[in-house]
Amino acid sequence: MLVRVAFVDDHPILLEGLVSLYNTKADLDVVAMGHTTVDALNILENHRPDVIVMDLSMPGDSFAAIDLILASYPETKVIVFTASSAIQPAVELIEAGISGYVLKGASSSDLHHAIISAYGGETYITPGFATKVIVSMKTAELRRKAQQPERLHHREEQIVSGLLKGLTNREIGLSLNISEKTVKHYMTSLMSKLNVRNRVELVIAVKNRTSPRERIAS
């Protein structure tokens, strides 16, 4: 089956070269080409290609156009073909759902492989550059996880509630019908979980975890 592909780039010579080159591929059918983000959207509306290969630096907001294509034409795979080797835009676009990020310094076989891979449901990134992108994505994921407060268990939430009311360990134990020793055990666990050293820091950490509405309610 032929993969129906469209190319959008504001460099006429490059665009003509891409169309001429990939029209010779037995597994590709170049159905349209354009120079701007508006052209890209018109191509999607009129031709519905399987894959669209787009530059980032062309007239119009390429990022907004890609977001619209991903949302409105999910059956079309988007490949970014760009001279930019900036990591952050690549990460953001891949996380948004594009199927390929190919640098213009890549070989013609790399872009061909990217088109076929995208059509097959895979994500293709220029080798070498892909390593940097993956490392950046993993680092960002670890950072997000580190910023997320660790979830407290039901009993820990009960202990925290008593703590915010200013109750002593003994009073918390009486309210929950557990021993003071058990409360101390939970306090130690909470201090470790929230990375604090004492009861005062634990109170501060707990208050920082709760919303203003929750603090008022408590």
Image (tube, grey):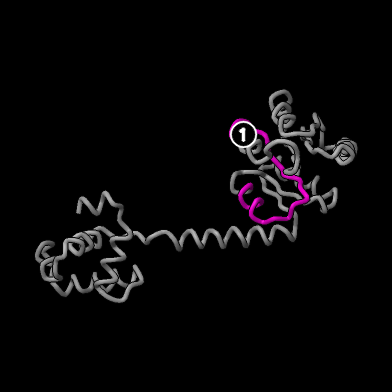
Q: Residues within 10 Å of mark 1 (few under 14, many from 20)?
A: few
Work out whether residue 214 or residue 54 is closer to the camera in this orientation and state it: 214
Q: Which of the 4 image quadrants contains residue 59? A: top right
Left/right of residue 139 with respect to residue 37 in the rendered view: left
User: On the image, numbered disc 1 is attached to which residue?
Assistant: 68
The residue lying at 84 percent from left, 49 percent from top is: 109
In the displayed structure, 172 sits above or below 86; it is below
In the displayed structure, 164 sits above or below 113; it is below
The residue lying at 23 percent from left, 73 percent from top is: 185
Q: Which of the 4 image quadrants contains residue 17? A: top right
Q: Quadrant of the N terminus?
A: top right
Res 24 visible: no
List x then y, in percent, for residue 127.
75, 58
Q: Quadrant of the C terminus?
A: bottom left
List x then y, in percent, for residue 100.
70, 47
Q: Which of the 4 image quadrants contains residue 30? A: top right
The residue lying at 78 percent from left, 36 percent from top is: 8
In the displayed structure, 132 sits above or below 188; it is above
List x then y, in percent, for residue 137.
59, 58
List x then y, in percent, for residue 35.
79, 34
The residue lying at 66 percent from left, 35 percent from top is: 65
Res 128 visible: yes
For badge 1, the amino acid type reads Leu
Work out whether residue 199 or residue 99 is closer to the camera in this orientation and state it: 199
Left/right of residue 26 with respect to residue 114 in the rendered view: right
Is 89 inside the magenta-drawn segment?
A: yes
Stretch in magenta: 68-93
